Amino acid sequence: MLPEVLSEFALSNSFLGNLIEVCLVTEDHQRTMEGLVRLGIGPFRVYTFSPETVTDQTYQGETSPFSLKVCFATNNDLTFELMQPLSGQTIVRGFLDEHGEGIHHLAFDCNGAPWQQRLEMFSEHGFTRTQSGRWLDQNSFSFFDTEVATTTCFETYHFPDGFAYPEPERWYPGPPPQQT
């Protein structure tokens, strides 16, 4: 059964909310950052997501440690994320092996719904979690098995109120100017 059309912009089963992130996966985060910076996207914060910085790591519903190089740049309220797999089983490695480099997933804010409700909404629509974790024991994130239905992976994540990005390992091409 198809959902009801509520307006030219909404369906009765809408729950994703706003697009907040586009992620590209790469074998070389530095090369990809350099290309995006040439297009005016940046500056990038560079982090390593590992069992030391990401708790509750899962892959296909099972506990599974992984490490990724993750880079973030936010321009005009849209975050550009780069992911490079370093170790462990990840959907990022699987995508690279099957498709090569490119856009891996889109992230949505689910209209600010509480975390557990977001997971339930994806599940109610028939999409299971493929990878998840909790960065700095604060930022919950989860990817869903949406590729067959949509041709790409969807993600949602939640930053708690007051969350501030920690100082990155490094900035590229450099840090923002100090505010005085």
Image: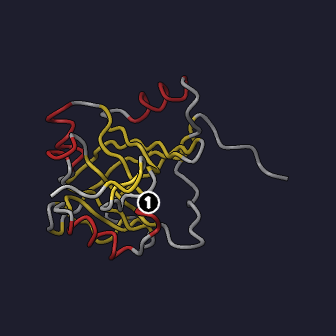
Q: Nearer the viewer, residue 123 or 82?
A: 123
Placement of 134 over or under 39, stated as above or below: below
Q: Nearer the viewer, residue 176 or 120?
A: 120
Placement of 58 over or under 91, stated as above or below: below
**Residue 131: % across, % down:** 23, 59
**Residue 41: % across, % down:** 55, 33
Occupied quadrant, residue 94: top left
Please, which colouring scheme is shown?
secondary structure
Q: Name the amino acid type tagged 1.
A: Asp
Q: Nearer the viewer, residue 148 or 67?
A: 148
Q: Nearer the viewer, residue 66 or 80?
A: 80
Residue 125 lies left or right of residue 33; in this view the side is left
Residue 112 lies left or right of residue 50; in this view the side is right
Q: How many marks?
A: 1
**Residue 9: % across, % down:** 42, 49
Q: Residue at x 33, y 69 (%)?
A: 118
Occupied quadrant, residue 135: bottom left
Quarter of the image with the N terminus is bottom left
Q: Residue furthest right?
A: 180
The residue at which mark 1 appears reads as: 109
Q: Residue at x 49, y 27 (%)?
A: 34
SS class, disc 1? loop
Estimate how packed mark 1 is, as few (under 14), some (14 to 19) or many (20 or more) residues with alpha carbons within 10 Å.
some
**Residue 130: % across, % down:** 19, 58
